[in-house]
Image (tube, rainbow, N blue to C red):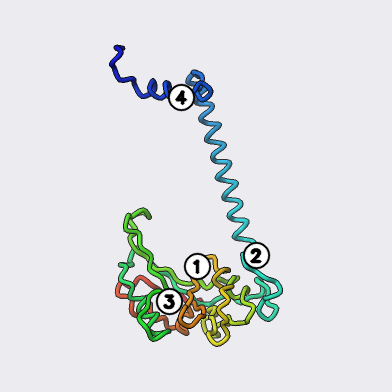
Amino acid sequence: MSENATPTLPEAVETRLPDEHREEAQPPEKKLLLSRRRMLGFLGVQLAAGALAVTNVMAAPKNFKPECTNRGITPAQLPNARAWLVTDPTACVGCRTCEIVCSLSHDDTCQPTIARIHTLYDPLHSLNKLCAMTEACKQCNMADCYLACQYDALVLDKKTGARIIDPKKCQGCGECLAACPWNMVVFNEAKNIYSKCDLCGGDPLCVKYCPADAIKFVELG
């Protein structure tokens, strides 16, 4: 190779690396063995991380305070919800009608930021061609928000079992928001209270007015 010739990529990398970082030449079978070891090590880390995540999910609510449980109810004793909202990201068009209807019906104002349902956007299509979707309270069976409230401001809807924040009892402490693993609790700064989806008493307006039919109200028998 002439003095003016541009070195190939391996040569260029080799000339830039200090001696202590250069790898000795290995036969193909040795390199393959090392690659397999590295891959197994990587998979081991992934499995450990997955096990840790499952453990955290199965553990007690992240903000669970035994001394503040509502009426002495433990997570296992909390009655299950009997209805919830299911959203279809393949149908959502991102119009935000659900947010507008929700804020108008609950707070008499067109303010999507305080709606109990949220529209998420993915303009770069990083989520497998997903561009918009809606998210609402999961009405968790072992509801962290319900168990975290020390003011007894969360109640259960008799018809749907939805976990509802009573605005008359809410003290704006934010414990419910801190406890919610899905960030589905909304803060109303003007009123200094928190709110969440109440399923509209069993007749959700977001479902009724969604032009794309992207939200379903599901009930158990």
Which residue is the site of mark 3? 114
Please, what is the three-letter code of the amino acid marked with disc 4?
Leu
Query: Which residue is identified by label 1?
Result: 183
Q: Give the mark toward the camera: 4 or 2.
A: 4
* Residue drawn at the location 51% of the way across and 19% of the way down: 24
Q: Is residue 149 left or right of residue 162?
A: right
Disc 2 target residue: 60
Of the pair 175 and 213, the residue shown nearer to us: 175
Task: Check whether the beta carbons of the residues at disc 4 and disc 3 lie within 8 A of each other.
Answer: no
Labels 4 and 1: the sequence-earlier one: 4
In this view, the residue in front, 220 or 24, is: 24
Task: Find residue 17 and name its label.
Answer: 4
Of the 4 image quadrants, the one containing the N terminus is: top left
Q: Position of residue 99 (x, y in %)?
A: 37, 75
Q: Secondary structure at mark 2?
A: loop
Give percent across and percent down for residue 198.
Answer: 48, 80
On the image, the x and y values in percent for residue 217 come to 43, 76
Crowding near the residue tagged with mark 1, few <14, some 14–19, many ≥20 C-alpha atoms within 10 Å: some
> Exactly how many numbered labels are in the figure?
4
Q: Could you give the CA–CA distance between mark 4 and mark 1, rounded to whole angstroms?
A: 47 Å
Q: 67 and 129: which one is in front?
A: 67
Secondary structure beneath label 3? helix
The Cα atoms of the two marked residues, 3 and 1, are separated by: 13 Å
